[in-house]
C-alpha cells in the first residue's frame, strides 16, 4: 500500500486543495494531510488555528463522495526554527510515506535534499485559488465564498473569521 503526504497551511482550506487531494489519490492509496505552521494563528497570513483548519478539512472531505475519508489522516505539524530539521519533525509526526505532494518550492526542495520523492499537484486557477488571495478578498469585502468549500465557509462564519482577519494587523504580504 502506498502512502503520500499533502502539505499545506490551509489558511483557509479551499477548492484548489480538494483538487490537489483528488490528484494525490490518483497516485497513492492513503494520504496524510499535513497542516503546516500548526502553532500559528491570529496572524495576517495565518488567521485560523490548527483546530479550525482541521475542522474545515475534515468536514470538506466528509462532504465529498469522491474522497474516502477512511484513507486520510489529518495531522498538525508546527514549524521549527531550523529549516533543515523540519522534514525530520514531519517524519516523527506522520505515518511512513512514499511521496510528498506540495506546490511550495522550498518545502519540495527540503524533501528532495533527503532523496524523498516530491510531486507537484496541478494548480487549479491559481490566480484566485490561493490562501493569500482569499484572505485579501475577505479583508476587502470582495466575493470569496465561491473559492472555498461550503464547509470551510460555514466554519469561517461560525468563528467570525472575516471579522478576525480584519482586526489582525497586516504585517506581511506573504504568498502561499
Image (cartoon, rainbow, N blue to C red):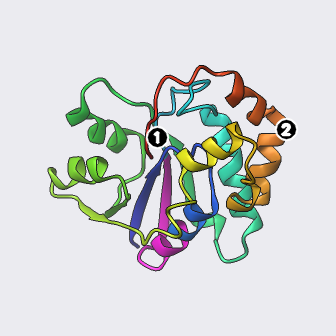
Q: Check the image and report above or below for 4 versus 92.
A: below
- Residue sitting at 62 percent across and 51 percent down? 13
The answer to whether mark 2 and mark 1 are in CB contact below 8 A is no
Image disc number at residue 20: none
Q: Which residue is mark 1?
A: 36
- Residue sitting at 66 percent across and 77 percent down? 66
Q: Nearer the viewer, mark 2 or mark 1?
A: 2
Badge 1 crowding class, 10 Å Cα cut-off, few under 14, some 14 to 19, many 20 or more, is many
Q: Position of residue 5 (x, y in %)?
A: 42, 57
Locate residue 139: give its quadrant: top right
Mark pair 2, 1: CA separation? 22 Å
Q: Which residue is mark 2?
A: 158
Q: Check the image and report above or below for 95 versus 83.
A: below
Of mark 2 and mark 1, the one earlier in the sequence is 1
Locate residue 112: give its quadrant: bottom left
- Residue sitting at 56 percent across and 70 percent down? 19
- Residue sitting at 80 percent across and 33 percent down? 159
Name the quadrant of the N terminus: bottom left
Label 2 sits on a secondary structure element that is helix
Badge 2 crowding class, 10 Å Cα cut-off, few under 14, some 14 to 19, many 20 or more, is few
Viewer-closest of 163 and 114 = 163
Tell me: 94 left or right of 169. Answer: left
Viewer-closest of 27 and 176 = 176
Magenta extent: 21-34
Q: Position of residue 3 (x, y in %)?
A: 41, 65
Amino acid at each position: 500500500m502506498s502512502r503520500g503526504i499533502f502539505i499545506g497551511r490551509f489558511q483557509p482550506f479551499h477548492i484548489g486543495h480538494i483538487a490537489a487531494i483528488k490528484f494525490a489519490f490518483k497516485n497513492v492509496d492513503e494520504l496524510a494531510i499535513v497542516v503546516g505552521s500548526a502553532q500559528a494563528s491570529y496572524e495576517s497570513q495565518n488567521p485560523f488555528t490548527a483546530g479550525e483548519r482541521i475542522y474545515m478539512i475534515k468536514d470538506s472531505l466528509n462532504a465529498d463522495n469522491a474522497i474516502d475519508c477512511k484513507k486520510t489522516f489529518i495531522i498538525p505539524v508546527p514549524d521549527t526554527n531550523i529549516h533543515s530539521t523540519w522534514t525530520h519533525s514531519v517524519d516523527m509526526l506522520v505515518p511512513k510515506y512514499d511521496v510528498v505532494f506540495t506546490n511550495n518550492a522550498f518545502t519540495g526542495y527540503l524533501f528532495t535534499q533527503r532523496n524523498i520523492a516530491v510531486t507537484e499537484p496541478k494548480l487549479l486557477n491559481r490566480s484566485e485559488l490561493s490562501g493569500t488571495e482569499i484572505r485579501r478578498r475577505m479583508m476587502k469585502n470582495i466575493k470569496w465564498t465561491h473559492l472555498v468549500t461550503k464547509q470551510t465557509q460555514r466554519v469561517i462564519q461560525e468563528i467570525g473569521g472575516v471579522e478576525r482577519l480584519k482586526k489582525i494587523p497586516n504585517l506581511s504580504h506573504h504568498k502561499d
